Image (tube, rainbow, N blue to C red):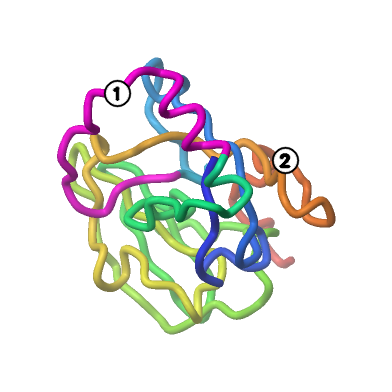
Amino acid sequence: MFWIPSSSMVPTLAVEDRMVVEKLTYRVRAPERGEVVVFRPEPSGERPDRPFWWWAVRAGVQFVGIVPLDQSDLVKRVAGLPGQTIEIRDGTLLVDGVAQAEPYLDGTAGSDFGPVTVPDGHLFFLGDNRANSSDSRSRLGFVPMDRVVGRALAVVWPPRNVAGLLGARPQPAVPGS
């Protein structure tokens, strides 16, 4: 269970949403462009050796807000995979020179950026609230794949925001649209 502390993923995720993240998919395959991913921006030490029940209880009390969540984890959308060239021009994300349709954005695209090429073994992340997100365009830079924690599945709290997060994948924009 993860808690959203900032507006960097609005409108997809609201401040104080709680979401479920699954950690198995990325043991089988790499993240795909467009997926909402939880990752650690900096290397972290090993979790203390504690029994499973301890972690389950902690997750429960974090969910209801009694214990703060680990705020070092970040949530962003994968915008670039290894070897891809990323650019933002006039508010449009270009991947390898091809404009991408991003239906999950609210129209605040932020400033022009790039082009940059994502190095091997790394990902390029963007927040959905491009005008208000510290992401790979600034302090994060390219994020090593081994820092990925898991894939965001769904918002589960508060009830008014309950929704799945797996459907919005960027597609090349239709010419003339």
Q: Judge whether 6 appears above or below 159 on screen.
A: below
* Amino acid under disc 1: Arg
Q: Position of residue 58 (x, y in %)?
A: 47, 37
Report the number of discs. Answer: 2
| Left or right: 42 as drawn, with respect to 73 | left
- For label 1, the SS is loop
Q: Nearer the viewer, residue 38 or 54?
A: 54
The quadrant holding residue 86 is bottom left
- Pick whichever of labels 2 and 1 is earlier in the sequence: 1
147 left or right, relative to 56: left
126 lies above or below 1: below
Check the picture and name the quadrant holding the N terminus.
top right
Residue bearing mark 1: 50
| Vertical side of 37 occupied by 4: above or below | below
The residue wearing badge 2 is: 164
Q: Residue at x 29, y 67 (%)?
A: 115
Q: Quadrant of residue 94?
A: bottom left
Q: Amino acid at mark 2?
A: Gly
Q: Is residue 86 left or right of residue 8?
A: left
Q: Is residue 47 magenta?
A: yes
Q: Position of residue 108 (x, y in %)?
A: 60, 80
| x and y, in percent, of residue 42 in the image | 20, 53
Q: Provide residue 124's location: percent of width, then percent of height.
A: 33, 53
Q: Nearer the viewer, mark 2 or mark 1?
A: 1
Of residues 48 and 149, the one nearer the viewer is: 48
Regarding residue 153, the answer to whether it shows in the image is yes
- Tell me what residue is drawn at x 74 percent, y 66 percent: 177
Magenta span covers which residues? 38-60
Crowd band around label 2 with a 10 angstrom C-alpha radius: few (<14), some (14–19), many (20+): some
Q: Residues within 10 Å of mark 1 (few under 14, many from 20)?
A: few
Q: Are marks 2 and 1 in contact (CB under 8 Å)?
A: no
Disc 2 versus disc 1: distance between alpha carbons?
31 Å
